[in-house]
Image (cartoon, helix red, strand yellow):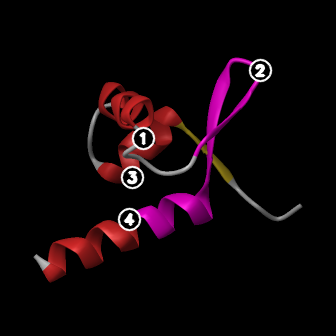
């Protein structure tokens, strides 16, 4: 099991935004893929990196 997982606060830190913004992205389906383990929301590092790369490509194309 080599996959690393991030919390909402850690994703917010990577994206240089607030945890509330990351929660909003999750609510509207805009953010990286996430899943729940009990009450905790987790994000696979690979999913966050993929989502950031797609956002970067979309920004470059615009």
What residue sits right under mark 1 in the picture?
29
Contact between labelled residues 4 and 2, with CB atoms less than 8 Å apart: no
**At numbered mark 4, what does the secondary structure look like: helix, strand or loop?**
helix
What residue sits right under mark 4 in the picture?
52
Residue extent of the magenta highlight: 34-51
Q: Earlier in the sequence, mark 1 or mark 4?
A: 1
Question: Is 27 displayed left or right of 62 in the figure?
Answer: right
Q: Earlier in the sequence, mark 3 or mark 4?
A: 3
Mark 2 or mark 3: which is in front?
A: 2
Residue at the left extreme?
62
The quadrant of the rendering that contains the N terminus is: bottom right
Q: Give the image location of residue 56, x and y in percent.
A: 27, 73
Q: Which corner quadrant of the image does residue 26 belong to?
A: top left
Q: Earlier in the sequence, mark 1 or mark 2?
A: 1
Q: Which mark is residue 38?
A: 2
- C-alpha span from label 1 to label 2: 20 Å
Q: Which mark is residue 14?
A: 3
**At numbered mark 2, what does the secondary structure look like: helix, strand or loop?**
loop
């Amino acid at each position: 099991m080599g996959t690393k997982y991030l919390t909402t606060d850690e994703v917010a830190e990577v994206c240089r935004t607030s945890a509330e913004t990351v929660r909003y992205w999750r609510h509207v389906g805009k953010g990286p893929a996430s899943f729940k383990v009990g009450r905790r929301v987790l994000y696979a590092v690979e999913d966050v990196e993929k989502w950031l790369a797609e956002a970067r490509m979309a920004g470059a194309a615009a």
